[in-house]
């Protein structure tokens, strides 16, 4: 029965009928938390909410808060009504709403730097620079770097002064889950640089029925070996990978010293294709995955006639990164007509730079790459 999803769609339209970019200082939306992340300020937290599929509103506890010591915590929230169930004054806390409904969709401004603030963890490379400006420049010029922490000349440990830590978070869309479903067709927005290259030279870096066991450092879901290769190529620590087809699991591996192949039926292993461009959509290339579902991370859904229209809808929506189309027809019980409909689900995940932890630390400076981010 389709009545409940259609009611939710109407609720969605009602919730997102307006853009509300304002920040409510010394205010809180308690409860209704979906996810808790870290942010250096309220603006960053608002953009995390905008990129998180389920987030409708948020609250950020700033470093000056005296009534709650969970400083730099960003609480992403939602309710079925789309509005906070409760709200009240709270010193040092900022609250606000997702920017998903804003047109044009605002892009994060990440030029600010944060003195005496540490972006803890996620290091993949270190070097010494004269000042934080040179550290930020190194981060901006390194295609993997998303944010940095610089230790200045007054730091207590003299041995690590002027050290620049380059840090990484995912900047490509990753599907939270992948499952086999006969009546699903899934794919990506053609605006994303996620579609793998089909050049012969790039394909030669894939090894069917070969497993490279061990040395896993991350495991993700992917719809194909080529998409697993994209994930490996996007991560600075990935030296090779193995993709298990019947589980849609992508094992990213790090061992720069050796790569031992083993026979593995149904496993495709390979090398990162960093020298191969990630192509935008090209006719004739595999951009749709039939019989594959990308569940979760829905931002909205509606009826369409075919998967091509669903892909076009995702591509034209600046919020959408990937989609799933349900080919099974349902009776349209909402309109009480005898026609039937198919559903298109638009989806997204967070891809903006997101430090895993933010804390106060004297005599360090943290900030973000100055490259532009759109999705």
Image (tube, grey):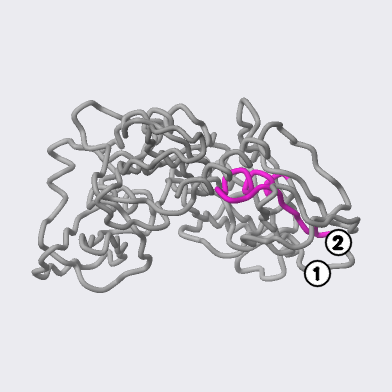
SS at mark 2 in the image: loop
Q: Which residues are magenta?
A: 43-63
Specify whether 266 is left or right of 251. left
**In the image, is residue 332 above or below residue 262?**
above
Q: Which residue is mark 2?
A: 65
Q: Which label number is shown at residue 294? A: none
**In the image, is residue 342 above or below residue 103?**
below
Residue that appears at 22% across and 37% down: 286
For this rendering, which residue is in front, 186 or 228?
186
Q: CA distance from mark 1 to mark 2?
A: 7 Å
Indicate yes or no whether the magenta region holds residue 228. Answer: no
Specify whether 85 is left or right of 89. left
Residue 107 spot, x, y in % from top left: 61, 34
**In the image, is residue 67 above or below residue 97?**
below
Residue 343 spot, x, y in % from top left: 40, 40
Residue that appears at 80% across and 42% down: 23
Q: Which residue is mark 1?
A: 69
Residue that appears at 37% across and 42% down: 330
Specify whether 160 is left or right of 127. right
The answer to whether mark 1 and mark 2 are in CB contact below 8 A is yes
């Amino acid at each position: 029965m389709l009545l409940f999803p259609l009611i939710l769609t109407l609720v969605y339209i009602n919730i997102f009928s307006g853009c509300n970019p304002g920040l409510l200082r010394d205010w809180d939306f308690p409860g209704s938390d979906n996810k808790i992340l870290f942010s250096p300020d309220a603006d960053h937290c608002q953009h995390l909410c905008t990129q998180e599929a389920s987030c409708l509103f948020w609250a950020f506890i700033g470093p000056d808060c005296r009534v709650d010591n969970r400083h730099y915590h960003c609480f992403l929230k939602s309710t079925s009504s789309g509005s906070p169930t409760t709200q009240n004054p709270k010193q040092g806390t900022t609250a606000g709403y997702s920017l998903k409904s804003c047109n044009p969709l605002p892009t994060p401004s990440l030029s600010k730097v944060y003195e005496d603030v540490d972006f803890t963890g996620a290091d993949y490379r270190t070097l010494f620079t004269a000042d934080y400006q040179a550290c930020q420049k190194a981060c901006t010029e390194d295609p993997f770097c998303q944010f940095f922490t610089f230790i200045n000349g007054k730091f207590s440990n003299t041995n690590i002064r002027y050290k620049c830590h380059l840090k990484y978070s995912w900047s490509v869309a990753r599907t939270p889950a992948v499952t086999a479903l006969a009546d699903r067709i899934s794919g990506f927005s053609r605006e994303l640089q996620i579609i793998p290259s089909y050049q012969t030279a790039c394909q030669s870096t894939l090894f069917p029925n070969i497993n490279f066991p061990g040395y896993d450092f991350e495991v993700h879901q992917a719809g194909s070996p080529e998409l697993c290769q994209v994930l490996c190529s996007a991560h600075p620590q990935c030296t090779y990978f193995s993709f298990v087809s019947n589980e849609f699991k992508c094992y990213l591996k790090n061992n720069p010293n050796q790569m031992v192949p083993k026979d593995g039926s149904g496993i495709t292993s390979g090398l990162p294709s960093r020298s191969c461009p990630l192509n935008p959509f090209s006719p004739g290339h595999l951009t749709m995955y039939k019989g594959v579902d990308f569940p979760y991370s829905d931002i909205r859904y509606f009826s369409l006639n075919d998967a091509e229209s669903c892909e076009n809808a995702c591509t034209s929506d600046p919020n959408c990164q990937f989609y799933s189309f349900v080919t099974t027809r349902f009776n349209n019980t909402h309109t009480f007509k005898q026609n039937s409909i198919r559903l298109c689900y638009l989806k997204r995940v967070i891809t903006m730079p997101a430090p895993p932890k933010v804390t106060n630390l004297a005599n360090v400076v943290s900030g973000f790459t100055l490259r532009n981010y759109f999705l």
